[in-house]
Image (cartoon, rainbow, N blue to C red):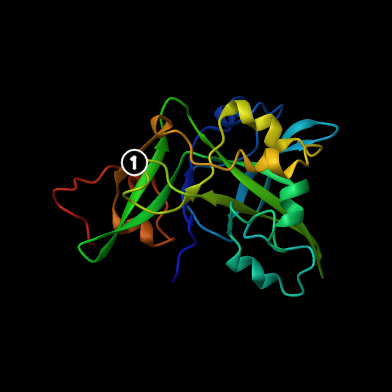
């Protein structure tokens, strides 16, 4: 199965920590996850006109409002930052419905000796990443379905030797501008789409157990001794 550019991540922080990091008035009910995959219901943070910043659980894999077939969401877990304002699937959401996606870390795969070795990227100096996302509302036969996509960009120095793409990770001072639905300046928003500073992120190899979505435990993020590559 082909993985999206950013196709796995973890969120195992206490809900209170998530609420504090993202300035939420109310903590969301969330249990630790170490292997979150597309089509899962995930935590997003957005700006509500009446309540301020709020968290919600919505499906990862964006279904455009105009879509006839919801299975298109299976192909739209990621949106390339370079063209997110142009692609019909994403441009309306980018302009009007942006969100933050809390993450304790994310996974990416590097080809080593002809095999795919997973790595885990995690924040330095902060408890969580704030990944830039967009959301959509799709009217289905059983009601409205809310979905989202992660925005990706080119790699920073940490990622460059692992993969040529990474999620857009926003610094705390950019959260307000990103979330504000009144901010519809494409030029200003696209300036936020860039690799995060190398100093804010670290990476280490992990077990190939993460390849199987059924595996979802804390051992997945344990560092792997690269002197003995794990092809299990």
In screen coordinates, is 66 left or right of 148?
right
Residue 158 or residue 140, whichever sits in front: 158
Residue 210 or residue 194, whichever sits in front: 194
Quadrant assignment for the C terminus = bottom left
| Tag 1 secondary structure | strand
In screen coordinates, is 115 left or right of 159?
left
Q: Is residue 1 above or below residue 128?
A: below
Q: Which residue is mark 1?
A: 203
In screen coordinates, is 74 left or right of 2?
right
Quadrant assignment for the N terminus = bottom left
**Can you see residue 45?**
no
Residue 189 or residue 168, whichever sits in front: 189
Residue 14 on image: x %, y %: 53, 32
Residue 58 on image: x %, y %: 67, 52
- The mark total stands at 1
Q: Is residue 34 above or below residue 29?
A: below
* Residue sitting at x 65%, y 37%: 28
* Residue sitting at x 78%, y 42%: 184
* Residue sitting at x 75%, y 41%: 185
In screen coordinates, is 184 left or right of 223?
right
Q: Is residue 5 above or below residue 43?
A: below
């Amino acid at each position: 199965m082909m993985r999206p550019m950013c196709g796995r991540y973890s969120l195992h922080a206490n809900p209170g920590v998530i609420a504090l990091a993202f300035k939420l008035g109310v903590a969301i009910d969330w249990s630790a996850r170490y292997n979150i995959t597309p089509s899962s219901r995930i935590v997003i943070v957005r700006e509500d006109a009446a309540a301020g910043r709020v968290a919600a659980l919505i499906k990862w894999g964006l279904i455009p409002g105009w879509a006839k077939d919801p299975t298109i969401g299976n192909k739209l877990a990621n949106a390339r930052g370079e063209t997110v304002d142009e692609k019909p699937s994403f441009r309306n959401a980018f302009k009007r419905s942006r969100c933050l996606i809390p993450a304790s870390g994310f996974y990416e795969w590097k080809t080593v000796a002809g095999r795919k070795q997973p790595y885990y990227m995690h924040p330095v100096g902060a408890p969580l990443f704030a990944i830039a996302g967009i959301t959509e509302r799709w009217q289905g036969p059983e009601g409205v379905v809310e979905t989202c996509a992660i925005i990706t960009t080119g790699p920073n120095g940490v990622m460059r030797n692992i993969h040529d793409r990474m999620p857009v990770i926003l610094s705390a001072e950019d959260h307000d501008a990103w979330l504000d639905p009144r901010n519809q300046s494409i030029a200003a928003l696209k300036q936020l789409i860039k690799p995060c500073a190398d100093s804010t992120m670290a990476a280490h190899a992990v077990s190939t157990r993460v390849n199987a979505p059924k595996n979802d435990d804390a051992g997945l993020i344990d560092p792997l001794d690269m002197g003995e590559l794990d092809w299990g």
